[in-house]
Every structure is written in structure tokens, then in C-alpha cells.
Amino acid sequence: MTKASDLFVQCLEAEGVERVFGVPGEENLDMLDSLSRSTIELVLTRHEQGAGFMAATYGRHTGKVGVCMATLGPGATNLVTAAAYANLGGMPMLMVTGQKPIKKSKQGRFQILDVVDMMGPITKYTHQLASADNIPARVREAFRLAQQEKPGAVHIEFPEDIAAEESDATPIPASLSRRPIADAKAVHAAVKKLEAAKSPILVIGGGANRTSTSRMLTQLVEKTGIPFVTTQLGKGVVDETSPHFMGCAALSAGDFVHRAIESADVIVNVGHDVIEKPPFFMKRGGTEVIHVSMNPAEVDPVYFPQVEVIGDIANAIWQIKQDILPQGAWDFAAMRRARAAEDEHSASLDDDMRCPIYPPALVRAVREAMPADGIIALDNGVYKIWFARAYRARQANTVLLDNALATMGAGLPSAMMSAMLYPARKVMAICGDGGFMMNSQEMETAVRLGLNLTVLILRDDSYGMIRWKQAHMGFEDWGLTYGNPDFVKYAEAYGAHGHRVESAEHLRELLSECLAAKGVQLIDCPIDYSDNDRILNHEIKELSAAL
């Protein structure tokens, strides 16, 4: 017979789990004891939200299920934001929360919430274990659903009396599973539409962010020369230094990239997810759309594709690539004019050496400092839009941003997870001062784990994105400013190394110095938000007329 908590951990080991992130509590002590004898590493964090963000980022990078744990009540509620982050963002993650005994009450309703019911709307699967014998089946089902397209968050509640039970059950091995292949006739119909088009374009979304899909899309673009754009979650799926890259749809509408898409007569929407609205609007009799995804298109007033290629995306793109013949009549001149206009706009801004630092100059400095495989992890703020638009990603999952839940506080934990997984690569967290302070306590975790990590804090002493929108909407500047600690001293208090930017040239020097150094390096960078309208809301009427 095996103790239930030991059996649970054996099931995690059978699933290939390498780390569990979390803040255990009294109701997790059996599981904690079992983990102490396991091959699985416990990564103790300072807040459950940080643990959840790290587990989700593990899932994002590897495609495997990241695991985090928390106690009942406040521990479980602290995982809610991370659960929504993983579920909306398509990141496989398992949350394990403790609970008081369910067969005999000792403390009334103290700390007890219906966590399973709470997790229902924001996970793919949630279950309370009521028997040790059911552990293998429930764990296997949770992992299966977490990884099934679209990946997401799952939750298991593990009451302490169940954890202490005995069972003769054993882990259930994962079955061999292959994704269904797209129908050949649907692929052929898509190819015929592309070959008959005058100016086709590829739109790459978050669902295409898979290793094999990235490879197949790169080969398709190289063979055909068809231009591509990305959504924010599709950044880096194909190398954005490619001459065929027409930009990232970082803004909702009206940007140069939207003009490029408007000049197309056939759009291939690859990996479309309704969490990111498509960067184009459909109308009956308008531009035809080919939907390539694992899942059928959800019909919407502005999204009703004419051809759907449903199945494994990488295989579907491979089939298209094998069948298609590049057409001499294709004309991409209008798209390239839009791309050239955006490049010209960026070049007119990114050499501004003012201090506080001008956003386009910041993006350029970071891009020049980071190697092709370097990873930047962004919090949520207007700087996310700057980087989505102007930072050209060379590889998939090298720009970790959240355009699904769009939460603050994820930048530092996401960068920490990246540094743990890829110790030989350069990793940088880019956080606003507001987002950084929401999980800044994880600096202690980063130092304790001995991570090599640069944390770039963009300091404007306010919730800058909302303050900008407040001004843009004509409201009085009120209620969005605050004070900050001395970030250099703050870093040093955790045992990290603190630096303060004194000029634009100094920023470049610090980026180079910190990325080359060992340990946790924090850079306090004053940022100038005053010119966001000029940076992001450019006047492109002349370009529209030309197209």
C-alpha cells in the first residue's frame, strides 16, 4: 500500500514533472513531505501568483505542463490571476491546492471556500479528490486536458485527509496521441485560392506558436515569398528580420500593418484565437479568409472565413507548402510600401537620445543589446505595444508578452522561469514600475536560485498607460501617480546588483554590462511617456491614399 500523497507525487513523476512552484501551507504538508523524497524540485516562491506565472511560463516554453501548488483559502485565491493568465494565453498548467479534511470537520468553515467551483470558469478542468484510489486517473486526465489544444490551466484540490489515505493504485502512463491531419481537399481548396489571388498575406497568431509550425511557416514563406504579419502572441514564430515581414498588429486598428493587410485580397489566418481579435474586419463580398487551425472558426460578425483547414497546423502548412506553386502575377508592392513607411517612421524616432529615455530609443537599445536567442519578458503597459511593434523577434518565445489576460505582474516571474530553463541564454524582464512592484518580492527568489537575469524597470512614478489614456480621453490628470522606493537600494537589499540610468548612452552601456554579468542585475530607467500619441497614433492618410 502507498500513502496517497506519495502516489500523487509518483503520478507527477510519471508525467515528467521536473519542478513544482509554490507556497505550501498546513494542508499541503503530506504532499510537501512526499516531494522531499522525490526527483521533483520544489521551487519555493514568495507569493502564489509568482509561482503560477512561473508554472505557466514553463508550459509556454516547453509545451509540457507546469505545476504549482498552494494551500486552501487565500493560497488558492492568490492563484486565480495566474490561472486566467495560463488559460487565456494557451499555456498548460496544473494547480494543486490543499483543503481541510472533507470526511470529518475539525474547524468549522475556517478558511474554507468552494475552490473547485471558483476555478470552474477559468480552467479547463477542476476536481476535488475524494479517494486515494482515484488519484492516478484524475492526474492523468488533468495533464491530458491541460495539453490538449487549446492548452490551458487545470486544477486539482487535494484535501489533507485524502492525502493521508493508503492505496494500492499506481500511476497511469500517458497514451500515444497524434493530432488529426487536415483534410487534403480542404488544403487543396486553400492552395487554389492562394494561387488565384493577386496579393495574398499570412496572418500568424498565437495558435501557430509551436516548434514544428514555426519551421513549416518559415519554409512556406521562403518558398513562396508571401508576406506575413503577426499578432502580438504570434511574434517570433517566423524570423521578423525576414524581408517578407510586414509588421506586428500591436494596435487595434489604423496602423501601418493594417494598411498592409487591407491591400490583400486573400488572408491566410494561421492559428487564430478569439482571445486576440483578428487585425482585419470582414464584410460579405470582401477579402476572402482561409482559416488554418486545430479548431474550427468561431463565427463572429467580423470573422466568417470562406475556407477552413482544420487539423494539426504544422502538417497543414506543410501540405500547403508542398502543393502550392508561386505565382508570377502576385503583387506585394502595396504591402511593402506600408512596411517601408513604418520603418521610416521608426527611424525618425529611435535615435532620440533624450533622458528620461524616449521609448523608441529604448526599444532599439534593447534589441541591439539582446542576441537572437535572447528572451525578453514584458509586463503589461504601453511599453508592451512599443516592443510588439518595433522589436523584431528572431525566434519563437523570445518575446514573452501577454495579450490575452493582459495582466500586470507577470514580467519578473516569467523572466525567472526563462532563466531557469535556459541558463546559457540572455534573459531580461522589462517591467513598468507599477507591474514590477506587484511581484517584486520574487527578487529574493531569483537571488536565492542563483539566476542570471537582468530586470529593466521603466520608471515614470505612475500607472503610465492608463494615465496616457486618461489624457487621450480628455479627463483631468488625477488618481494615477505614486511614489517609488529607491530601486537601486531595493535591489541591493535583496542581494541583487542595482544600477541607475543617467543618460541614453549610459542605458546602452548598462544593458551591455548587465547582460554580460552574473547574478540578478536591476536597472532603474526613467522613461518619457509624454509623446505616446506621436509614437503610436501616427498620421497615415497619405499612405492610405497611395494604397
Image (cartoon, rainbow, N blue to C red):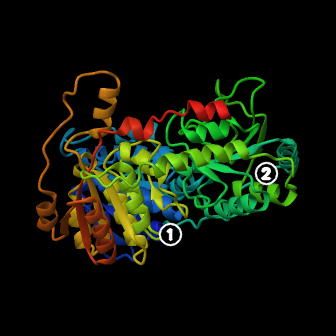
The image position of residue 508, as x and y in percent, is 32, 66
Residue 29 point in image, percent of width and height: 25, 62
Confirm or deny contact between disc 1 and disc 2 (CB under 8 A).
no
Asked if residue 483 lies left or right of residue 163, the reply is: left
Return the mark for residue 93.
Answer: none
| Quadrant occupied by the N terminus | bottom left
Q: Is residue 42 left or right of residue 444?
A: right
Q: Which residue is mark 1?
A: 372
| Residue lying at 59% horizontally and 58% vertically, measured from the top left | 237
Measuring 79% from the left and 45% from the top, which residue is drawn there? 331
Q: In the rendering, which numbered label is found on residue 182?
A: 2
Residue at left offset 87%, top offset 48%: 188
The answer to whether residue 231 of the structure is visible from this angle is: no
Residue 473 position within the rendered picture, expressed as x and y whole percent measured from the top left: 34, 23
Q: Is residue 113 left or right of residue 212?
A: left
Dot placed on the residue nearer the N-terminal end, 1 or 2: 2
